[in-house]
């Protein structure tokens, strides 16, 4: 599975548009991966987001926003496995 795997933080930074400000390297790698092999997000990141929403640390809409982005071209969800 070539490309990059984005963790929960990177996904949140993509969602709020702050990725380039937080990490230029990560922003370049995500951009390159979107153009070539894709960005992979673990289903575990969605569990993290669910926890953040349930604990009141993120608004409920963040889950829908994440689903929209990851459901788009260039992204894929990686299932949990051993």
Image (spheres, rainbow, N blue to C red):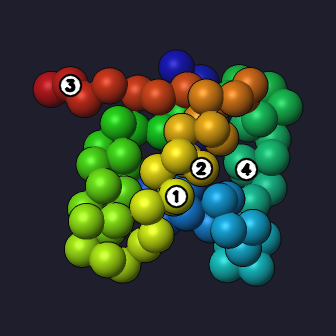
**Separation (CA) of disc 4 from disc 1:** 26 Å
Where's residue 66, x and y in %? 55, 47
* Mark 2 Cα-neighbour bin, 10 Å: few <14, some 14–19, many ≥20: some
Instruction: Return the residue at label 1.
Output: 61
Instruction: Work out whether mark 3 precedes mark 1 in sequence or the reverse, and give the earlier one.
Output: 1
Identify the element where label 2 is drawn.
Answer: helix
Label 4 environment density (alpha carbons within 10 Å; few <14, some 14–19, many ≥20) = some
In the rendered view, does 42 fall on the left or right side of 69?
Answer: left
Q: Can you identify the residue that label 3 sits on? A: 81
Name the residue furthest front: 60
User: Measured from the top left, where is residue 10 in percent x and y?
Assistant: 56, 60
Q: Residue 47 carries which label?
A: none
Q: Image point 74% across, 25% down: which residue? A: 73
Binning the other alpha carbons within 10 Å of mark 3 as few (below 14), some (14 to 19) or many (20 upward) gives few
Q: Mark 2 points at which residue?
A: 65
Nearer to the camera, 53 or 13: 53
Residue 39 falls in image quadrant? top right
Camera-nearest label, 3 or 1 = 1
Residue 13 in the image, given as x and y percentages of width and height = 62, 66
Q: How far apart are marks 3 and 1 (CA)?
A: 27 Å
Tell me the CA gap for discs 2 and 4: 21 Å
* Viewer-side label of 2, 1: 1
Residue denoted by label 4: 29
Callouts 4 and 1 close, C-beta under 8 Å: no
């Amino acid at each position: 599975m070539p490309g990059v795997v984005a963790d929960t933080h990177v996904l949140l930074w993509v969602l709020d548009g702050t990725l380039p400000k937080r990490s230029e390297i990560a922003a370049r790698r995500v951009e390159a991966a979107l153009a070539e092999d894709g960005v992979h997000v673990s289903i575990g990141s969605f569990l993290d987001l669910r926890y953040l929403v349930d604990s009141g640390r993120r608004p409920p809409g963040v889950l829908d926003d994440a689903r929209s982005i990851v459901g788009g071209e260039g992204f894929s969800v990686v299932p949990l496995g051993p």
